[in-house]
Image (cartoon, rainbow, N blue to C red):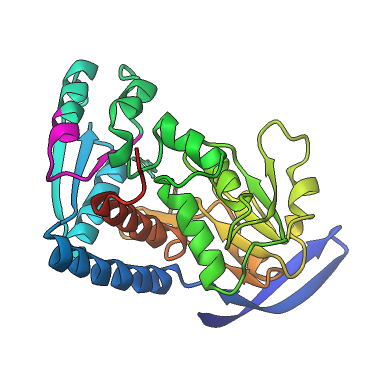
Amino acid sequence: MIQALFSYKRDLNLESTIATTMTAVIIDGKKIAEDIKREVKRETEKLNADKGITPGLAFILVGDNPASQAYVRMKGKGCEEMGFYSITERLPAETTQEHLLQLIDKFNRDPNIHGILVQLPLPKHISEEHVLTAIDYRKDVDGFHPINVGKLVIGQECLKPCTPLGVQELLVRSGNDPSGKHVVVVGRSNIVGKPVLNILLQKQKGANAVVTIAHTGAKDTSQYTRQADIVIAAMGRPECITGEMIKPGAVVIDVGINRIDDTTAKNGYRLVGDVHFASAAAVASAITPVPGGVGPMTIAMLLRNTLLAAAGTLYHE
Ligand code: GUN
């Protein structure tokens, strides 16, 4: 973890300028993800030596969304680092749902493939629900299959979504165990908001939190976030959570990755989170940066899920 000093000036009622200086801990997701990857690599070598199993992960990418292409590339690189077998099927945006379902069926039956990941979003003519349900739930390393969603809700062992698992690991490994804390999640997506709620509220180690979800239906989001010991920002809107919305000393986890135009940047854009970093860091006790916070954790947890799926110990039916 890095200690950083932030100077942040706030104009209050245009009358006075208060200079706030505060030391916030930056939670280093890159480092924590590297620690997890080392553990996964060690376990993978053991699985290989003991049982002759090499984890195999199939990626399916439909269309040419640049962000999705970059994510799949990074996930594939992670597989290589772990010594996994991986294959990426890149399909044109016009691919039919039937063709995609046939490909999923092929991977469902392939004994060398233990995990299947269909990168989202899918083109509009393809039903996400249909596609995700077609994946064998024992190979569902994203944790999006309705069987896994149901198991997560009732606290049964299962494959769980990677980004929420990454958030939980970040909290625990940075010394901010959520147990007994009030966690306020902003955003109710199926990928982050809902599963992070279901993970953190379980009566289990590294969880056992009191969890609130705020979303676009809330009249005043800050009314909720100001009560939080831990704020998890996951609504996909750049820099919306500001320092004024955070209780002094709270922990802030920023799940957002947004590209915003920046003419001074070489590629014309820069990445920002859902949190306004400078103002939030001035009041928080700890905060994740973007990039280098939750992002690397998602990949680390995908690799761990693939190892779990390959080991075949999660499901007993
Ligand atoms: N698109 C954005 N996040 C994710 C994710 O975690 N998994 C998949 N499959 N697609 C995504």
Q: Nearer the viewer, residue 198 or 97?
A: 198
Q: Looking at the figure, which quarter contains the C terminus?
A: top left
Q: Nearer the viewer, residue 152 or 182?
A: 152
Q: Is residue 304 left or right of residue 231?
A: left
Which residue is at 62% across, 49% downward? 240
Residue 165 visible in the current orientation: yes
Q: Is residue 260 left or right of residue 309?
A: right
Which residue is at 49% across, 63% downward? 169
| Residue 32, picture quadrant | bottom left
Q: Is residue 35 above or below residue 139?
A: below
113 in the magenta segment: yes
Residue 120 spot, x, y in % from top left: 34, 35
Q: Which residues are magenta?
A: 106-120
Q: How many marks?
A: 0
Q: Is residue 316 left or right of residue 273?
A: left
| Residue 68, picture quadrant | top left
Q: Is residue 252 left or right of residue 132?
A: right
Q: Nearer the viewer, residue 50 or 54?
A: 50
Residue 148 spot, x, y in % from top left: 43, 37
| Residue 45, picture quadrant | bottom left
Residue 264 visible in the current orientation: no
